[in-house]
Amino acid sequence: MIKKYTMGSPIETEAVTAVIEPGDFSDFPFEHDAKNGKFSFGFSMSEDDIIYGLGEANRGINKRGWVYESYCSDDPFHTETKSSLYAAHNFLLVGSGKPFGIFIDFPARIRWDIGYTKSDRLEITLDGADFDIYLVYGGSPREIAREFRSIIGKSYIPPFWAFGYQQSRWSYHNAEAVDRVIEGYNSAGIPLDCVYLDIDYMERYKDFTVDSEAFPDFESYVAEKRAQGIHLIPIIDAGIKKEEGYSVYEEGRDRGYFCKRADGSDFEGGVWPGVCGFPDFLRPEVRRWFGEKYRALTDIGIDGFWNDMNEPAIFYSVEGIENALEKAASLKGENLDLGGFFSLKDTFTGLSNSQSDYSSIYHTVNGEQVNHQRVHNIYGSSMTRAAGEYFAESFGEEKILMFSRASYIGAHRTSGIWFGDNHSWWSHILLNLKMLPGANMCGFLYCGADLGGFNENATRDLVLRFLALGVFTPLMRNHSALGTRDQECFRFEKPEDFRDIIEVRYRLIPYLYETFRKASEENEMIFRPLSFDYPDDPVARECETQLMLGEECMIAPVYEQNAGGRTVYLPEDMTFVRLSGTRETVEKLGKGLHYVSVALSEVPLFIKKGKRIPLCMPAMRTGDLRADKAEWLGE
Ligand code: GLC
């Protein structure tokens, strides 16, 4: 059962596709308050309430004990005390005797104090008082998640090849660099379906252009790679470089399509290309215009994209940098004391993604000027929607790969997401695992993290263990940052270990793909916390390092360095399978705690009693997989 409560005149986000009439607000069941233009409400949590949700968010599967903020943020340090990452997924599920879900359809900032100020109180504060709140009641957490999904529309399904292994780096600067990657994988016999083009494929970081020195005949090159079974996936950023003669910029400016300042002039901010205009993606005509721009690349054979920097990331505004430079100039020759020095330093470090810049941006919503802060969380998803809607219309469903960094619920209908700039840290294997059920609850099924970690140098064992989690995530992409150690599988000693892991992925693809399709069609989660399936099992209820996968499996990756295995909890008797290349060892284990040894070249998998999964033979490309020739694993 779903109840909707509306206050004021909410901004239409189109997150919910079902038509639901709002109920009488006097029936709103929680203590609430509207002060200083902010609406807040809250309730007491019982000791054994598990709080799930918030999608791609920091910390645990159980969100208790921290304060989170829905505010899409370009923050590359996903340390434990951060409150906001790239997404705003405003769905929370209170799992207790009588579980219920809360979706707050409100695109400005929301603060979720989940037992942070008072350990038994959940307090939610909206930066505004115009919103729709949906309460979902009845049944188990799994049923509530399914019911919520039924009102937000079906999840995006990517093309089949997007389940293949994908290699990325910031950046493969030219065709030779891309070729070296493909050759490296081919000669190590490691399967591969996609290679990514990060910002350097463009001409001076201008969207929808290709640097003709780096890729002299891009169209033929794309065709040549396709003939080798490889998809090239270029990045598209939100900011449009301000440059005379660059048609996308000139069109955007001349048609008035960029976001504005209060005085009606174009807001200008710096990102990778330098000063940019930011398309006002909230306007349908701007989305249509931007969506069609992807044709420059689809016309020459590109069939996948990743949308980036769309929170939006703003390194500096033109005003901000001028003020900072003036301040620095005024201090020249001064003997800076502690306060003076740090104030100068903060002036520069505070330039990026600054609240005063966001507050100075205006959008046009239904012909009216709306401050960016009121709609911040739908900016990135509107960019991705522009692309996704264009692709679905022009190419049909399941043809174009599309995923985004920033997102809001609703974008799950036309795209996937990746979890942004994680680190090559062991703790991030678990952090990324914990994001999966939350993202699934909010409709984002096609998702995954930068395997091996994006920032800083990875070690061989970390990449292998990260990949062994990635074997199960719909998006299986290894990506790393500029200046970090090479992270492609064939660069490390004993590449055959990497081949063993990635071959397991290809063996599982028909199963994973069917599980994915089913989850999209039936509004199911692919990944569930153990507590969803075993609500009365106290150990399962607290488990934060394992997940249920589909109806058949449980996953439990190794997440610590120098560990030859891990302790795993079986909530019922299961078949433990160690998969490695085309080999597998099978062992029956009883309910309870076990230490299982897992070599670096092995993927651990647990199959439930009475369940079977198909395993096909691996291939170098997804197109060569033979799902009809699968063997069955399990009982
Ligand atoms: C951002 C993205 C990252 C990309 C980089 C350069 O940091 O999150 O994936 O490699 O920009 O485009």
Image (spheres, rainbow, N blue to C red):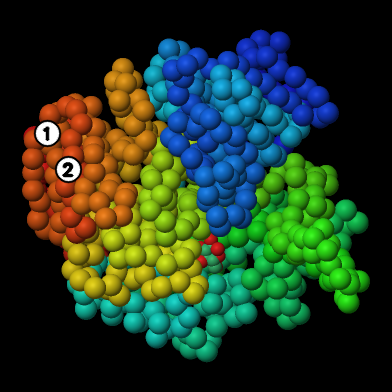
Mark 1 or mark 2, which is nearer the start of the sequence?
Answer: 1
Is 362 above or below relative to 345? above
Near mark 2 (Cα within 10 A), the count class, few <14, some 14-19 or many ≥20, is some
Judge from the rendering whether residue 494 lies leftward or rightward of residue 53; answer left or right.
left
Q: Nearer the viewer, residue 248 or 417?
A: 417
Is 534 above or below relative to 29? below
Q: Amino acid at mark 1?
A: Leu
Q: Amino acid at mark 2?
A: Val
Residue 619 seen from this side: yes
Read off the residue under disc 2: 596
Whole-percent x, y for residue 588 in the image: 8, 35
Read off the residue under disc 1: 589
Judge from the rendering whether residue 629 lies leftward or rightward of residue 227; answer left or right.
left
User: Which residue is at 70% across, 39% downward?
Assistant: 108
Is 227 above or below relative to 18? below
User: Which residue is at 40% across, 86% downward?
Assistant: 176
SS assignment at label 1: strand
Whole-percent x, y for residue 422 in the image: 48, 56
Whole-percent x, y for residue 506 in the image: 22, 57
User: Which residue is at 31% across, 17% downward?
Assistant: 536
Tell me the quarter of the picture where residue 291 sits. Answer: bottom right
User: Which residue is at 42% across, 28% downward?
Assistant: 146
Near mark 1 (Cα within 10 A), the count class, few <14, some 14-19 or many ≥20, is some
Q: Are marks 2 and 1 in contact (CB under 8 Å)?
A: yes
Judge from the rendering whether residue 62 lies leftward or rightward of residue 573; answer left or right.
right
Q: Nearer the viewer, residue 570 or 246?
A: 570
SS assignment at label 2: strand
Residue 387 seen from this side: no
